Image: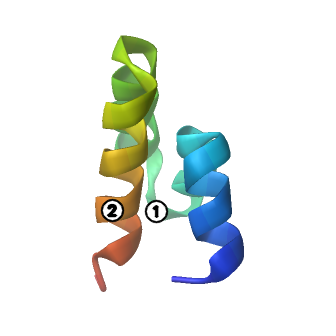
Amino acid sequence: MSFFRVLLAIIFPPLSVIGKGCGSFFIVLLLTFCGWVPGVIAALIILNNPT
């Protein structure tokens, strides 16, 4: 998890997980629409996952 990805996850969460797959992108996008904080948390969790 690079510094740039973490910074991107804080600013715009869906864009930071776009490389992890389509499903992750849409989940984080939906959570970001529900509220910014859930989107950031989900993006950081997905980025922290080693798989």
Label 1 secondary element: helix
Look at mark 1 in the image and give the residue it sits on.
Answer: 20
Residue 46 is labelled as: 2
The image shows residue 39, relative to residue 36, as above or below, that is below
Residue 50 horizontal/vertical position (percent): 30, 85
Q: Quadrant of the C terminus?
A: bottom left
Image-quadrant location for residue 27: top left
Residue 33 horizontal/vertical position (percent): 44, 15
Amino acid type at mark 1: Lys
Residue 11 horizontal/vertical position (percent): 66, 43
Relative side of 35 to 14, left or right: left
Q: Residue at x 35, y 14 (%)?
A: 34
Q: Residue at x 51, y 55 (%)?
A: 17
Its colouring scheme is: rainbow
Q: Earlier in the sequence, mark 2 or mark 1?
A: 1
Relative side of 38 to 20, left or right: left
Q: Nearer the viewer, residue 20 or 4?
A: 4
Q: Nearer the viewer, residue 31 or 19?
A: 31
Relative side of 14 to 21, left or right: right
Q: Nearer the viewer, residue 8 or 15?
A: 8
* Badge 2 vs badge 1, beta-carbon distance below 8 Å: yes
Relative side of 23 to 11, left or right: left
Label 2 secondary element: helix
Residue 45 horizontal/vertical position (percent): 29, 62
